[in-house]
Image (spheres, grey):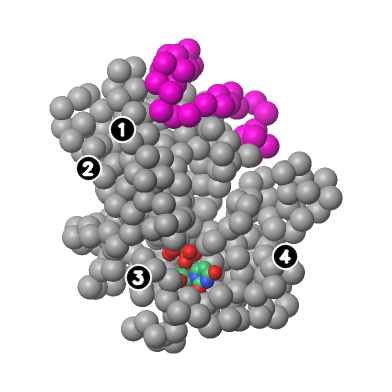
Amino acid sequence: MNKKPTILVTGGAGYIGSHAALALSDASWPVVVIDNLTTGFREAVPHDVPLLVADIADQPVVETFILDHDVGAIMHFAGSVVVPESIANPLKYYHNNTAKSRSLIESAIRCGIPHFIFSSSAATYGAPAKSPVSEDTPQRPINPYGMSKLMTEIMLADVAATHPLNYCILRYFNVAGADPKARAGQSTIGATHLIKVAVEAALLKRDHVSIFGTDYDTPDGTGVRDYIHVSDLATAHVLALEALIADPATNHVLNCGYGRGFSVLEVLDAVERITNRGIVRRFEKRRAGDPGALVSDNRAILECLPWKPLHADLDEIVAHAVAWERKLGQPGGAFSNVMG
Ligand code: UDP
């Protein structure tokens, strides 16, 4: 068998990128990481994985790194991920997510990289009229985060039409949980994503959870999302890579979710159940830029890739998030240099 090419993971010190790097290593793919460590953690990158601390838009440095390591494909995770922040600071999102992706894609083309996997988002669908959402649903983002991701999707499609590169766009629904062996997890400071926030509240790291909106057109009035375990998502990336290599003439656009949704209240109930602790709930107004329900139609990924989710269970997702959060909180625990 041919030697496996090296995979460049941008944002590999971040939450999803670090799990993808682990999944690649577990499947015996050589991995290298570029991360500027603005939100990522050096400790999230295994010691045997080369880490370039640099910005993905620093083209000379990035291109030298790609050529030095004989990179054969790029998984691009680096970017900013908080919807409310994107509304407050749209130019940050168009810079970090759109402009810097343009720069990285240009570096990929200049270095002759044949395969590109891009972290996109269900936020590109906006507030779809119908749920579950299939890949051919019109993309009408309702916040700059979603728009910044959609613009990168468009660039990739245009570039692939005229350069020797195929791509897979993975549109993530709500990513949560942590590596089942607790080798990685979500370490974000000042997290805003629901499961992390709720777990922090249950472990007394914050005093309450705000519930943003109780008047959505959903069964209990709170927002409904399709929560996907980060390790299942990471596996999808490895399988997408294999599909791109197996058929270089084909591109893929795939939703990543389990095809079922949970409300904010159901998530809080699950966190209380798993931790056996109460959470103080504060009912508040809707948060700007939030759709009511966003659930994937995941038939395309199930048909296209040999993807078999192993952790499609809300309680398991929460249990792994809790285990990681406890590890973060321990003296000498994961990333204690930044947490303590
Ligand atoms: N949410 C909430 N309180 C929080 C964080 C989130 O009620 O502290 C709700 C949010 O309005 C949405 C769902 O939880 O309905 C998921 O939001 P999150 O920020 O986790 O992800 P998003 O879907 O915005 O990417």
Q: Name the residue under label 4.
A: 205
Q: Label 3 to label 4, Cα distance in Å?
A: 28 Å
**Relative to 124, 238 lies left or right:** right
Residue that carries the numbered disc 2 in the rendered image: 154
Give the residue type that dot 2 points to: Ile
Q: Is mark 2 on a helix, strand or loop?
A: helix
Amino acid bearing label 1: Arg
Residue 137 sits above or below residue 335 on the image: below
Q: What stretch is highlighted in magenta?
A: 42-70
Residue in view at x 68 percent, y 37 percent: 43
Measure the alpha-carbon separation of dots 1 and 4: 38 Å
Which amino acid is tagged 4?
Answer: Lys
**What amino acid type is highlighted by mark number 3?**
Pro
* 10 Å crowding of disc 3: few (<14), some (14-19), many (20+): many
Whichever of labels 3 and 4 marks the residue nearer the N terminus, that label is 4
Q: How far apart are marks 1 and 3 (CA)?
A: 28 Å
Image x and y of residue 272, in percent: 66, 77
Residue found farthest to the left: 162
Give the camera-side residue of 56 and 327: 56
Which residue corresponds to mark 1?
102
Of residue 176 and residue 337, the one placed in the foreground of this image is 337
Residue at (24% x, 73% y) in the render: 130
Q: Residue 64 location in percent, x, y?
A: 45, 14
